Amino acid sequence: MQEPPLITVLVLTYQHASYIRDCLESILAQRTTHAFEVLIGEDGSTDGTREICLEVQQRYPERVKVLLNDRRNVIHIEGSPSGRWNALNLYTQARGRFVALCEGDDRWCDPGKLQLQADALLADRRAGGTFHDTAIITDTGERTGRMFPTSPLTSLPLADLISTLAACHFSSFMYRNHPGFRRIPRWFKRVGVFDMVLFALAAEQGPLIKVPGTLSEYRKHDGGITMVRHNTGSRLHLHRMMLWLRLAHHVKGLPEDRLRAIITEHFGRVCREDDRRTAFIVLRDLFLLAPTPLLMRPYLVLRMLRMALHASTAMPGHNASQRS
């Protein structure tokens, strides 16, 4: 049997015909002394993405493997099709000691990325993963800014990941592969923000360390996953709260005070940005999505009830005549 490579690169793609070649070329252009393989999860595209992926596999048969998915396996979240089944399937197929990530509409922008991140994990055996800065580009490739504000922190323990924002972008992350990524609880299929779950699972093994440079680019366009319902407005806050409540029962080391603070911050935004009815709907749905973690925290439930009761009866910016 062929010896596993040090690094597995996972590429999730669906309807990315305009971008996938750019993505794959940026990965295959990596200059590294470490052996790496590329696993592409092609999720049943009809726009030519699948054909491009198969063409690349044919050109690089020793390095690239395409997993052809069936749309009947697609997991829907709040009625919207997601790439969750594709992602979970890819994670279980990764053979490398380290796993790097990229979605098919994003790209890497430095040929030394894999070398730098793998060397960082080899040098620090305590680290669970590594990340770097990410730029934002348009659908045509022009840079428009940075994904997250540059942080002075060079090491993030699990507790510091509890935040309203992700620690890094998906395309910047490399993690140390371990058996936990093959034991997937059922709730993973329902939470809307899976990248933050992944970061926490890696950080449970050790801190996430930051390497210097802007080494990847996130492509912002109308077909991106940030446009679906569960990634906007009150539903985004709902899924972030579910994420942290569920994770508190799945990983070790999440401090309870930080957990309470992030839940009330998200729910406070719902109460400020929407109305009382929406706040109670979100609270009800949170009970449906994470019943046990909430019931174990009656003090938190009471606080959220008080917050909902004090929310406005009108949508922000709407007057009484508009509501009637």
Image (spheres, grey):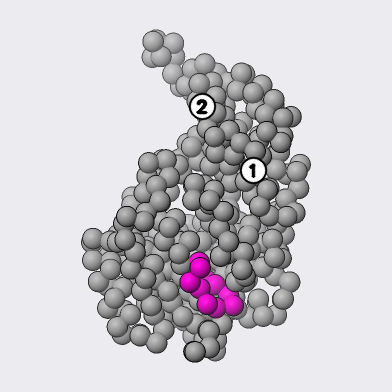
Q: Which residue is mark 1?
A: 245
Q: Is residue 187 above or below residue 142?
A: above
How crowded pointer 2 is (Cα within 10 Å; few <14, some 14-19, many 20+) is rated as some
- Tell me residue 151's x, y (percent): 65, 58
**In what element is the residue under mark 1?**
helix
Amino acid bearing label 2:
Ile
Residue drawn 28% across and 66% down?
Answer: 49
Q: Is residue 129 left or right of residue 279?
A: right
Quadrant in which residue 305 is drawn:
top right
Q: Which residue is mark 2?
A: 281
Q: Is residue 86 left or right of residue 295?
A: left
Residue drawn 68% across and 48% down?
Answer: 249
Depth check: give the residue in front, 149 or 304. 304
How crowded pointer 1 is (Cα within 10 Å; few <14, some 14-19, many 20+) is rated as many
Q: Is residue 10 above or below residue 321?
A: below
Residue span colored magenta: 91-100
Confirm whether residue 193 shows in the render.
no
Image quarter in which the C terminus is found: top left
- Tell me residue 199's x, y (percent): 60, 59
Q: Is residue 79 above or below residue 148?
A: above
